[in-house]
Amino acid sequence: MAKANPFQFLQQVRAEVAKVVWPSRREVVLTTIMVFVMAALTATFFFLVDLTIRSGLSVVLGLFG
């Protein structure tokens, strides 16, 4: 296996980094807002599922306990 030339490696790295398309500020803000909205919706969903299961278990345990 041939060793890579460090200078050639750095040139290739710079060429690859130049191909990267960075998101605009607006895209970053919108994506961040969507992440927070989805996290809140998910937390609400699991809270309601937990509340339902807890209530159901309380009823079942109250009948047999």
Image (spheres, rainbow, N blue to C red):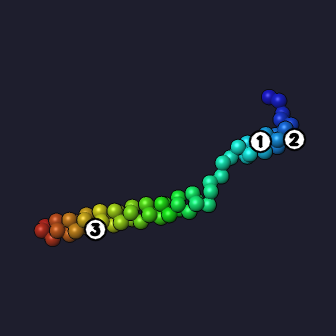
The N terminus - image quarter: top right
Packing grade of label 2 (10 A; few <14, some 14-19, many >=20) is few
User: Alpha-carbon distance for marks 3 and 1?
Assistant: 54 Å
Q: Is residue 30 rendered to the left or right of residue 1?
A: left
| Circle 2: element type | helix
Which callout, 3 or 2, points at the residue further toward the start of the chain?
2
User: Alpha-carbon distance for marks 3 and 2?
Assistant: 61 Å
Packing grade of label 1 (10 A; few <14, some 14-19, many >=20) is few
Q: Residue sitting at 49 percent across and 60 percent down?
A: 35
Residue labelled with disc 1: 15
User: Alpha-carbon distance for marks 1 and 2?
Assistant: 12 Å
Question: Which tag is nearer the camera, tag 1 or tag 2?
Answer: 1
Residue labelled with disc 3: 51
Task: Note whether 23 is above or below 64 in the view shown.
Answer: above
Which callout, 1 or 2, points at the residue further toward the start of the chain?
2
- Picture coordinates of residue 20, whole percent (x, y): 68, 46
